[in-house]
Amino acid sequence: MSGADLQDSELIILTGMSGAGRTTAARALEDLGWFVIDNIPPTLLLEALELASGSSDIKKVAVVVDTRSRSLFAQLSSVMSDVALRIGSVTIVFLEATDESLVRRFESSRRPHPLQNDEGALDHRIVDGLVREREILGDIRAVADLVIDTTSLNVHDLRRRIEAAFDSDGESDFHITVLSFGFKYGIPVDADMVADVRFLPNPYWEEELRQLTGRDRAVSENVLQGSGAKDFLTHFQELLGTMREGYLREGKRLVTVAVGCTGGKHRSVAMTEELAAMLREKGLRATVFHRDLGRE
């Protein structure tokens, strides 16, 4: 099959840490109409794509590639160079989570980490497998187009993140996820840009607003009327619009912008909702996700 036959195809490489939600993400993609191939050795990637493209109704393929392929995984980088020349659109999605979260997931499922009992391993704890896996995945994580930290996500949250990124129906070539968070819960590791809106007055200190959230009109109006709020939003959305061309030139179509306040309940939520609305008005595709809303 000629290389030109693959130029109309779209490919997602789904990879990341074991236990971080690859199965959930793969199922979400499948439900969106992607043809999903699970746990394929990198050396067979092009062959699998050519076979899939032989069907006229398969143009979107998602391939799960991870360390279960053991030593074969090391060949992924070289294979990706050939794939990038043959496929019209390639997106690398990397799922990760904190070691603490991953250990809990493995212990609750009573399954071993795939690398913790590898031949030659000096230790056999789950955390030892995670350390080896992070070393192996370091290069692919560095070039990923979309990194999703699933530490605080349930399966439904992860499905929504995948759907938001890939259920586009060709609407736009550039997609921004605007994510609110609370600094006291940590900065999102999957953010491409982080904005701090703690300079705004905190509605938490107003008794009638404390139990509400940034989604409530009273809180939203209070936040947006704060000194500097409108100017910040105007300049920030203009900055993102300016960066769009450069991101696309570098092949990055999926961008995550994190907007943080202290607890992720009032200011960051209101500003995230407003920023996404402004981006949509400019013709950009923007999706909202509130990471820490409901944790307080």
Image: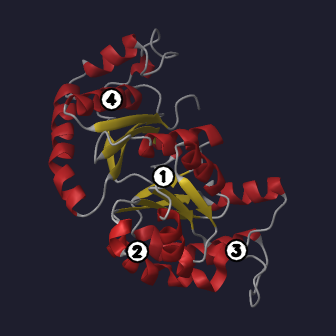
Mark 2: few/some/many CA within 10 Å (<14, 14-19, 20+): some
Pointer 2 residue: 83
**Dot in front, 3 or 1:** 1
Residue 61 falls left or right of residue 88? right
Residue ID at (27%, 21%): 224
**Dot in front, 2 or 3:** 2
Label 4 – label 2 distance at C-alpha: 40 Å
Q: Amino acid at mark 2?
A: Val
Q: Earlier in the sequence, mark 4 or mark 2?
A: 2
Q: Amino acid at mark 4?
A: Met
Label 3 – label 1 distance at C-alpha: 40 Å
Foreground: 220 or 183?
A: 220
Q: Earlier in the sequence, mark 3 or mark 1?
A: 1
Circles 2 and 3: CB atoms closer than 8 Å = no
Residue ID at (67%, 74%): 68
Residue ID at (37%, 28%): 267
Pointer 3 residue: 129
Pointer 1 residue: 57
In the depicted structure, whether residue 136 falls above or below residue 285: below
**Dot in front, 1 or 4:** 1
Q: Amino acid at mark 3?
A: Gly
Q: Amino acid at mark 1?
A: Asp
Foreground: 37 or 59?
A: 59
Mark 1: few/some/many CA within 10 Å (<14, 14-19, 20+): few
Q: Earlier in the sequence, mark 2 or mark 3?
A: 2
**Dot in front, 4 or 2:** 2
Pointer 4 residue: 271
Label 4 – label 3 distance at C-alpha: 40 Å
